[in-house]
Amino acid sequence: MGLIYALNGLYFSAFLFLTALGLSIILGVMGILNLAHGSLYAIGGFVGAYLIGLMAQGNMTLTLVGALLGAVVAAGAVGFVLETTLIRHMYKRALEYQLLITFGILMLIEDLIKLVFGGESRYASAPCDAMGSLDIMGHTYSVYSLFVMAMALAAGLLIWWLMVKTRLGIMLRAIEMDREMAQAMGIPMRSLTITAFVIGSALAGLAGALVVPTSPAVLGMGMDPLIMAFIVVVIGGLGSLRGALLGSLIVGLTRSFTIAYFAELEMPLLFLIAVVILIIRPQGLFGQK
């Protein structure tokens, strides 16, 4: 059973990695503590569930691809609207102002989701059912869970390539390291901050769409991933892809084994790990001082 618990931990880590990576990019490049990030995850979940239900009678591969792309586009588009209308006014504001505004955005998006999709849960298990399961050391395990892990890995490699190997990524990292210097060098701050927010939003939407074949889309579904994502950023370090990956693995595996053996200690143990990291290394495992 230990192997199954480990696989379940990796499965949870995959969603968490995508959500935390998007949050880390927004925090690192823009310096915005975005409490609305969980709502973008929820948008991805509801859009993904809706599209899967709409296209479920067709080819399941095309259905899943269409649902994932639709969720990414929808979350990215909402992120674009948020950044260009509300978030852009918060860059030089105090932290408590950011928290209040982004919490208000979270509440607004939750109400809009309820208005558009209704208050009932949406189930979209067709892709998971279609992929079936396989036998792992005498235990049945969903092929879809392995697909989610592969998707998270592929998205992580794509973001790594974007941030390390492209001019766009170099400029984004320059803003993260020294915003004033980057602006003095003529880097187009306006367009790049929009780009960073849209990328972060799209990653959250992808995570939400990937989760709905195994868990229904429900109102408030983005709150737990948001809290977990903040824990990952604390552990891994702000703006670090390696940190987001390692932090997600630590949180995901810890959560899986704790639920299996000591369910009541799940959240306290995760917060304890985050507190210990903050005391020993306040910038996180891979964060810059």
Image: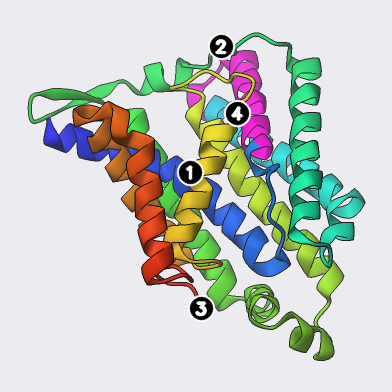
In the image, residue 251 above or below residue 221: below
In the image, residue 174 above or below residue 50: below
Label 2 sits on residue: 57
> Which circle, 3 or 2, is nearer the viewer?
3
Badge number at residue 45: 4
How far, Cα to Cα, is label 2 from label 4? 20 Å
Q: Decide which of tag 3 and tag 2 comes sooner along the chain.
A: 2
The answer to whether the residues at label 3 and label 1 have Cβ atoms under 8 Å apart is: no
Q: Amino acid at mark 3?
A: Gln
Q: Decide which of tag 4 and tag 1 comes sooner along the chain.
A: 4
Q: Main secondary structure of the magenta part?
A: helix
The answer to whether the residues at label 4 and label 3 have Cβ atoms under 8 Å apart is: no
Q: Decide which of tag 3 and tag 1 comes sooner along the chain.
A: 1
Query: For residue 41: magenta?
Result: yes
Which residue is drawn at the image coordinates 52% and 69% (left, top)? 161
The answer to whether the residues at label 4 and label 1 have Cβ atoms under 8 Å apart is: no
Locate the N terminus and report the quarter of the image it occupies.
Answer: top left
Give the secondary structure at mark 2.
loop
Indicate the position of residue 183 as horizontal and vertical percent values. Answer: 82, 84
Q: Amino acid at mark 2?
A: Gln
Visible in this render: residue 127?
yes
Label 1 sits on residue: 228
